Image (cartoon, grey):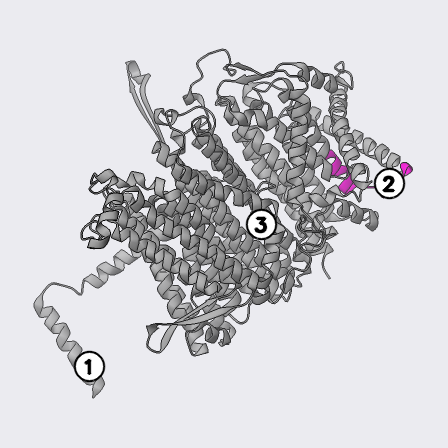
């Protein structure tokens, strides 16, 4: 049943791609319509009988998104059934290689990630139809966008369904390549082309690493089906090699430092609903791949792996958020913050691996639950923020924080929904981001039960780094909200922005915002639902999670730690309302409007406000060694002895150190190598004949 | 009964906070050879502000109006979770010490947003500095409370205090470090000298005051009151975690009276120490604060490590 629903969702995604293709300007729906459907469709497609060449009619624009929404709905349904059912359904399709048919399986882990995929997908499909309208008049047809979106989603769903390495890699490549075309959609922009190429390059290098990782296991297991890989028992050296390859491959897709550089380039380049899916969902598919490989396929776990994952995860978390703080482009900032959140997820996974390898599977389960919960939460609030950024882009055509400001007066509904996302990602109680970080800290605090002293002191240090990260994340997103939505407008088109009137857009955002609040306030039922999943991966469930009732979250035991987000929300609202009642209703003093204090000089303008760069300046200065800051001040002076400054231009740029340290040298090395190899190719026919001759002689010598 | 007790304790907390602020001011005045205002002056100030008509600056949105209520509510909830007079109260189960840090973060976030809502330079400056300082102070605080939590095997404050009470008078190196870290954080987070100066309105030196510059009337009253509660909260945390003796373990009248007397005494002593340090030290330059806070962070991490290496070794 669940597998059937999942299959339908894959089909719906594929169909949505085909529908977009068919409805395109050269598609069958426009050109040669079959006679029987020409009349009714003609009427609908060409509005009021007026042909609209090159333009999608409302229906043709909506159908692909409708199918995507159907796909999302079926994904969630299949996911919930698989998660609660707790059994694994398998099927074999008569496709693929002659000796290896496609094996499909839907177990609770895949089911959970189907839910992670489904909810943002529904939101994106609600958001999309109005959002893509502006692309209609652009150079590129919407059918390309629709086709690759469908393939991209279908690829992600197939990755989750795959039960053999062959299908897994096909689906993985489908996902990667389709998303490459989505990143390159607006390819008239050179930066987008560069971003897309970088993305494709890194995705393919990652894919090679994953293939090799599967290859190692397959060599020991004797086959590519996951069941055979599970039964493989390589020695520790080979399983470590497989683990490192998998970490590199999946980590590259997930955006772990230092393999994250494609992420802040590619995510802003894609259209916003695609960025939401890429950042919210595709990174989670990589997390899924890693969990599948490390917790499911590899039979034994070494503590050194946990340490490596913990260190890389913490580094990604803190560097990601530090770079995010220095970005002025909203979508780029969100992309860097994805690096941070993936870092948090991997830190929690590292904790889980360490606990599990030292025999504390119960605590390992807690770490795994923290990681899974954060994956879901991040999918929700990051999609919300990306779609919100898309809505701002749609209303104002502005991406730079330095030009925004005062949007709360222009787009009040969007501002309220964006605030929910901001508070969630800043990990404030009682929103959902806080729950997963709280669980992480609770796991880390149990480090005392580990025997090894080094690990016991490593884990608290990692949690110290995570504490810093979460505080910096709050700073970062307070900055985003304060600079973009509050204060005075910094440019004219922002001051004239119109409110979002598209119900679909608002509905998509509202769905995600509601989920953020809901999972933040009532996390316990959700964690209870993960029981079957953890049972199948680690062999344990969290028995005490609802020891005090469903309102309370008690990860270890009631006397160790308890948190009741619902009561926290209730208390906050009650106290706040009581104050409001006592202070406002009872006195009845209406506030008076007045000018803000301007030190008596008069004329406060938007230019005297703190900008985004100014807000994060103290952090930039404190963490100076992390950044490569380029600051230039150009001065034009004239008059006697050049004393009068006529023009002043200030520019600053914060560059990613990973580029300078890792990427540029390796890029240069590749170029040098290519040039060196290129010497073979002289262009002279005699030399080539010489090569052939010598090759022939060598071959004859080998054969004889 | 227990819930009633918890509500009563929270009300006591809220009620006593201005008194503590008055006491600090009084001690400070005496130390500086000035004539001190009455101990109840903070209450009079709050009453005065309550009766005044508040002013909304033109560019402000609903965030500006809502922020004081959220700040106050989150501070009150934080106060509800901290054992003041008695332990074993049910509110400690609703939110543990990590959530306590989260409550502070929630209040601060809205205060900072309100500061940016007006679109003046002061608001932005105060907001930026507040977030910078708190993003360094919050991890130090978390590390300090983690030291406690790892020793006591719980993040529930009531249980943790109970643990310290049960284990009697032992000198733990980790607690010494953690207390040092927590005191430094408390001074930074409550905006006292040498990080911020609550008495100044000199433009370039203020942080907390810069954010709330536009507030007036009942909103200002709420924010002032919330910051007084926050000051007392840190005092109670330090007093009751590291020196919990005297706190009521049962709900008998004697024990409660004893608990109340002891906490008043402890807070009075802490306040004198705070006033002394404020008189003796000068305010730091803003870019020295990170050194101060990284010292606090270091102390907390040292506390954690010394717990793991010295105390938890088997």
Residue B42: horizontal and vertical position, in percent?
A: 73, 20
Q: Which of A331 and A159 is in front in this view?
A: A159
The residue at the far bottom in this view is A704
| Image quarter (top left, top right, bottom left or bottom right) of the C terminus of chain A | bottom left
Tell me the distance, in whole angstroms, between the alpha carbons under discs 1 and 3: 63 Å
Which residue matches tag 3? Answer: A436
Q: Nearer the viewer, mark 1 or mark 2?
A: 2
Residue A523: horizontal and vertical position, in percent?
A: 60, 49
Q: Nearer the viewer, residue A499 or B306?
A: A499
Quadrant assignment, res A224: bottom left
Which residue matches tag 2? Answer: B251
Residue A204: horizontal and vertical position, in percent?
A: 34, 60
Sequence-first tag of 1 and 3: 3
Q: Is residue A100 visible?
A: yes
Q: In this view, does A421 lie above or below B12?
A: below
**Are there few (<14), some (14-19), or many (20+) residues within 10 Å of tag 1?**
few
- Residue A699: mark in rendering: 1
Q: Which chain carries label 3?
A: A
Judged left or right of residue B256, residue A548 is left
Q: Nearer the viewer, residue A537 or A318?
A: A537
Q: What stretch is highlighted in magenta?
A: B235-254
Quadrant assignment, res A627: top left
């Amino acid at each position: 049943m669940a597998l059937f629903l999942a299959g339908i969702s894959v089909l719906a995604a594929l169909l949505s791609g085909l529908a977009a293709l068919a409805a395109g300007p050269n598609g069958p729906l426009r050109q040669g319509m079959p006679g029987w459907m020409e009349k009714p469709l003609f009427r609908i497609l060409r509005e009021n009988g007026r042909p609209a060449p090159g333009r999608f009619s409302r229906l043709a624009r909506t159908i692909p998104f409708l199918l995507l929404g159907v796909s999302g709905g079926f994904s969630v349904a299949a996911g919930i059934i698989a998660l609660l059912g707790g059994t694994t359904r398998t099927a074999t399709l008569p496709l693929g290689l002659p000796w290896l048919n496609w094996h499909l399986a839907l177990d609770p882990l895949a089911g959970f990630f189907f839910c992670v995929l489904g909810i943002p997908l529904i939101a994106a499909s609600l958001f999309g139809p109005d959002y893509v309208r502006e692309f209609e008049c652009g150079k590129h047809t919407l059918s390309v966008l629709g086709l690759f979106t469908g393939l991209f989603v279908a690829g992600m769903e197939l990755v989750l369904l795959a039960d053999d390495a062959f299908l897994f890699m096909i689906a993985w490549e489908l996902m990667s390549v389709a998303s490459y075309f989505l990143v390159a959609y607006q390819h008239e922009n050179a930066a987008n082309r560069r971003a897309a190429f970088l993305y494709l390059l890194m995705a393919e290098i990652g894919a090679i690493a994953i293939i090799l990782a599967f290859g190692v296991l397959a060599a020991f297991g004797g086959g590519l089906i996951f069941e055979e890989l599970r039964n493989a028992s390589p020695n520790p050296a080979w399983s470590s090699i497989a683990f490192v390859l998998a970490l590199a491959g999946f980590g590259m897709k997930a955006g772990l430092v230092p393999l994250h550089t494609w992420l802040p380039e590619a995510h802003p380049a894609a259209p916003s609903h695609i960025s939401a899916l890429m950042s919210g969902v595709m990174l989670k598919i990589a997390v899924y791949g890693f969990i599948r490989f490390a917790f499911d396929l590899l039979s034994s776990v070494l503590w050194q792996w946990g340490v490596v994952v913990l260190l890389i995860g913490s580094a990604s978390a803190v560097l990601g958020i530090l770079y995010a703080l220095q970005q002025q482009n909203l979508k780029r900032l969100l992309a860097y913050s994805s690096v941070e959140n993936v870092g948090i997820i991997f830190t929690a996974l590292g904790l889980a691996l360490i606990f599990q390898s030292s025999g504390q599977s119960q605590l390992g389960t807690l770490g795994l639950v923290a990681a899974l919960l954060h994956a879901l939460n991040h999918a929700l609030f990051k999609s919300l923020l990306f779609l919100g950024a898309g809505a701002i882009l749609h209303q104002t055509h502005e991406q730079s924080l330095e030009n925004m400001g005062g949007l709360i007066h222009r787009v009040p509904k969007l501002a309220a929904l964006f605030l929910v996302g901001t508070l969630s990602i800043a990990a404030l109680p009682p929103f959902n981001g806080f729950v997963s970080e709280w669980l992480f800290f609770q796991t880390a605090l149990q480090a005392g039960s580990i025997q090894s002293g080094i690990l016991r002191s490593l884990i608290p240090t990692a949690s110290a780094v995570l504490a810093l990260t979460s505080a910096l994340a709050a700073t970062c997103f307070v900055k985003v909200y304060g600079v973009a939505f509050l204060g005075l407008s910094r440019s004219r088109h922002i001051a004239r922005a119109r409110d979002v009137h598209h119900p679909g857009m608002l509905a998509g955002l509202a769905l995600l915002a509601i989920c953020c609040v809901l999972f933040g306030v009532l996390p316990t039922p959700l964690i209870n639902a993960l029981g079957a999943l953890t049972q199948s991966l680690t062999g344990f469930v969290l028995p005490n999670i609802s020891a005090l009732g469903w309102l309370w979250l008690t990860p270890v035991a009631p006397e160790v730690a308890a948190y009741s987000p619902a009561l926290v929300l209730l208390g906050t609202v009650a106290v706040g309302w009581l104050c409001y009642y006592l202070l406002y209703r009872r006195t009845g003093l209406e506030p008076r409007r007045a000018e803000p204090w301007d030190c008596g000089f008069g004329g406060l303008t938007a230019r005297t406000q703190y900008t985004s760069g100014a807000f994060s300046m103290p952090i930039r200065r404190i963490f100076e060694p992390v950044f490569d800051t380029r600051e230039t001040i150009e001065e034009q002076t004239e008059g006697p002895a050049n004393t009068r400054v006529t023009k002043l231009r200030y520019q600053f740029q914060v560059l990613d150190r990973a580029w300078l340290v890792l990427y540029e040298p390796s890029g240069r090395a590749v170029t040098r190598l290519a040039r060196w190899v290129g010497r073979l190719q002289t262009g002279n026919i005699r030399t080539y004949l010489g090569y052939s001759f010598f090759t022939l002689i060598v071959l004859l010598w080998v054969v004889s | 009964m227990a819930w009633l007790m918890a509500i009563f304790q929270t009300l006591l907390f809220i009620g006593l906070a201005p008194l503590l602020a008055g006491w600090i001011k009084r001690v400070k005045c005496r130390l500086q050879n000035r004539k001190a205002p009455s101990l109840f002056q903070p209450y009079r100030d709050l009453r005065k502000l309550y009766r005044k008509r508040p002013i909304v600056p033109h560019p402000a949105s609903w965030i500006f109006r809502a922020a004081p209520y959220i700040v106050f509510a989150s501070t009150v909830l934080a106060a509800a979770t901290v054992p003041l007079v008695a332990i074993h109260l049910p509110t400690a189960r609703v939110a543990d010490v990590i959530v306590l840090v989260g409550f502070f973060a929630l209040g601060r976030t809205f205060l900072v947003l309100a500061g940016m809502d007006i679109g003046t330079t002061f608001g932005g400056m105060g907001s930026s500095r507040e977030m910078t300082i708190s993003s360094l102070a919050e991890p130090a605080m978390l590390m300090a409370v983690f030291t406690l939590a790892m020793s006591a095997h719980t993040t529930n404050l009531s249980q943790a205090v109970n643990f310290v009470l049960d284990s009697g008078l032992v000198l733990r190196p980790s607690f010494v470090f953690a207390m040092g870290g927590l005191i430094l954080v408390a001074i930074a987070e409550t905006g006292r000298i040498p990080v911020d100066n609550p008495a100044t309105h000199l433009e370039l030196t203020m942080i907390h005051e810069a954010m709330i510059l536009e507030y007036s009337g009942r909103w200002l009253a709420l924010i002032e009151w919330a910051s007084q509660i926050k000051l007392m909260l840190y005092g109670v945390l330090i007093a009751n975690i590291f020196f919990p003796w005297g706190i009521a373990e049962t709900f008998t009248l004697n024990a409660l009276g004893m608990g109340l007397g002891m906490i008043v005494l402890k807070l009075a002593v802490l306040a004198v120490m705070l006033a002394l340090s404020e008189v003796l030290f000068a305010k730091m330059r803003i870019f020295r604060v990170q050194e101060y806070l990284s010292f606090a962070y270091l102390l907390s991490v040292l506390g954690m490590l010394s717990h793991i290496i010295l105390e938890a070794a088997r």
